[in-house]
Every structure is written in structure tokens, then in C-alpha cells.
């Protein structure tokens, strides 16, 4: 995917997904949404990829949310736009679900995805950011989930994923007010994990990606699945998932390689087997 609204590039074990509509502040139309899904599927099926970076093109915006000028969720630019009345005649629930599924695919990606949040993350762009495993933000970035200011409720996972990241009270405050916060406040709340100068966002993300990629990929992926499962399960059920996933790693060739490398006092050479 070297062209289009979403770019997918690969360098060794690292994949980089870039929202590439800087002229529209990386806003999401239908084509962009679908391209995100295609990029994540490509990452999922590539056994060489161990970690990914998700970012936006340009200097000021990660993603400004839904592109209201180019299309609605039910039509793309160049097609006949489905009117609001027609959309209402259909089940709006059915309209929303496929787009939610794409964000869920991002969250459920086989490998860790690092958010290189190069600028503002607003609305659906904010909700997309919540799907990423670690978030590194520019000092200039701001964050808002302002749907209530427009008579809408968040519908791309904001009410579900945000509370699991920053807690119930802070989630309600941000969503009920639609308030925009800066990177410092986002870091204080735990919404982002690191705040760095804009010029260092990608560099910091690449450094973290390299550190992750050095580890046994099957083990990293199992840990990601277990941690993600903990968001929906109680401790007892979560421990069952953890044990099952850990059991898949113990007999792996990577585990044998790790112990052999330790014995031989060398760095392990993991192959994802």
C-alpha cells in the first residue's frame, strides 16, 4: 500500500501504517476507514512483522475525525451520497457496526501497535488512538472527544475503551464536556504514555518498536492477547487465558533458543517458532 489514503510500509520486522490525507487533516472518509482495515489485515498475515507504528502524515494532526465534507459513513466521494433521511430509513446500528469492526481489528492486531501521535486527535481520531497499545504524543498534540457538542454520542468505541485506560470518572468528564485537553493533561490522565517534542515522535516510536522486536515474537503476541483479555474478564478467567497462552510459548523453539543463548552468554536469535 504505497498509495492512497493509508500507507503501509515495511522495514524488516517493523510495519508502519500512516494516515495520508494531510490536506484533510487525516480525516476519515469511507475509503480511509476501509484502507485502515486492509493495512491491519496485511500486518496480521505477514509472519515477518513483529511490531507496528501507527501515525498520521503532516506536522499538526494525527487524525481530525470523521470527514464530513467528503462523505458520510454510508457513501464515498464520487458516489451518490446517501441522504440523512435514507440513512434513517436503514438501521443506523447496521451502518455503525462495520466501522466499529475496523477499529476493533486495529485493537486486536496480532502484533503490538505503537501510536506515534504526531498532532491533534479529535473525535473518531481520538477513538482510533485508543485502539493502539502504546501512545507516544507530540508536545503540541491536543485531544478531544467532542460528539456531545454536536448532539451525538461517541460511537467508535470511545465509551468503552477510554474508561479502561483512564478510569470511569475521567472518562465521563471528558465525554460529558467534550473538552479539549493538551498533551500534558493527557499524560497525567494516562491517555498517552510518553510526551516528546514533535520532531522526536517517530524516532521515539521506532526506538520502542526496535526494543519490542528484539524479543520472542510468539511470547510478545501471547502477552498482548492475555493483557487485552484482562479488559473484559475477571481475574480468575483472565488467569485461565494467561495460562493457556503461556503454555503455547513454553515448548516453542524461541524458548529453547532463549535458554541456549543464556547458557552460551550470547544474544538470542528469535525466529517466531
Image (cartoon, rainbow, N blue to C red):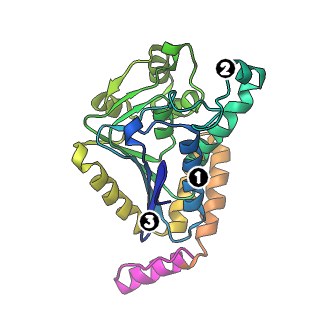
Residue 84 marker:
2
Helix, strand or loop status at disc 1:
helix
- Which residue lies most toward the bottom here? 264
Q: Position of residue 191 (x, y in %)?
A: 40, 34
Residue annotated with mark 3: 10
Tell us which disc is closer to us: 1 or 2: 2
| Magenta stretch encompasses residue 42 | no
Q: Are marks 3 and 1 in contact (CB under 8 Å)?
A: no
Q: Position of residue 28 (x, y in %)?
A: 51, 37
Looking at the image, residue 9 lies above or below residue 174: below
| Marks 1 and 2, the one that precedes in the sequence | 2
| Marks 2 and 3, the one that precedes in the sequence | 3
Residue annotated with mark 1: 226
Badge 3, how many Cα within 10 Å: few under 14, some, many 20+?
Answer: few
Q: CA distance from mark 3 to mark 1?
A: 26 Å
Quadrant position of the C terminus in the picture: bottom right
Tell us which disc is closer to us: 2 or 3: 2
Q: For the magenta stretch, what is the residue range?
A: 254-273
Q: Is residue 233 visible?
A: no
Residue at left offset 42%, top offset 43%: 21
Amino acid at each position: 500500500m504505497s498509495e492512497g489514503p493509508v500507507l503501509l510500509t515495511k522495514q524488516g520486522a517493523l510495519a508502519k501504517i500512516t494516515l495520508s490525507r494531510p490536506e484533510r487533516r487525516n480525516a476519515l472518509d469511507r475509503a480511509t476507514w476501509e484502507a485502515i482495515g486492509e493495512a491491519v489485515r496485511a500486518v496480521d498475515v505477514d509472519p515477518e512483522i513483529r511490531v507496528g507504528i501507527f501515525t498520521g502524515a503532516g506536522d499538526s494532526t494525527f487524525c481530525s475525525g470523521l470527514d464530513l465534507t467528503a462523505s458520510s459513513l454510508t457513501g464515498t466521494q464520487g458516489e451518490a451520497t446517501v441522504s440523512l433521511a435514507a440513512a434513517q430509513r436503514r438501521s443506523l446500528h447496521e451502518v455503525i457496526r462495520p466501522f466499529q469492526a475496523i477499529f476493533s481489528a486495529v485493537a486486536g492486531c496480532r502484533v503490538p501497535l505503537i501510536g506515534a501521535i504526531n498532532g491533534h486527535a479529535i473525535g473518531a481520531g481520538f477513538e482510533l488512538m485508543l485502539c493502539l497499545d502504546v501512545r507516544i504524543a507530540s508536545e503540541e498534540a491536543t485531544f478531544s472527544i467532542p460528539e456531545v457538542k454536536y448532539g451525538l454520542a461517541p460511537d467508535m468505541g470511545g465509551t468503552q475503551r477510554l474508561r479502561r485506560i483512564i478510569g470511569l470518572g475521567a472518562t465521563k468528564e471528558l465525554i460529558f464536556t467534550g473538552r479539549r485537553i493538551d498533551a500534558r493533561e493527557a499524560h497525567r490522565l494516562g491517555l498517552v504514555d510518553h510526551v516528546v517534542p514533535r520532531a522526536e515522535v517517530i524516532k521515539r516510536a521506532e526506538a520502542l518498536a526496535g526494543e519490542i522486536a528484539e524479543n520472542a515474537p510468539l511470547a510478545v503476541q501471547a502477552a498482548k492477547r492475555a493483557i487485552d483479555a484482562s479488559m473484559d474478564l475477571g481475574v480468575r478467567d483472565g488467569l485461565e487465558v494467561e495460562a493457556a497462552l503461556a503454555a503455547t510459548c513454553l515448548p516453542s523453539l524461541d524458548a529453547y533458543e532463549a535458554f541456549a543463548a543464556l547458557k552460551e552468554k550470547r544474544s538470542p536469535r528469535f525466529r517466531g517458532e
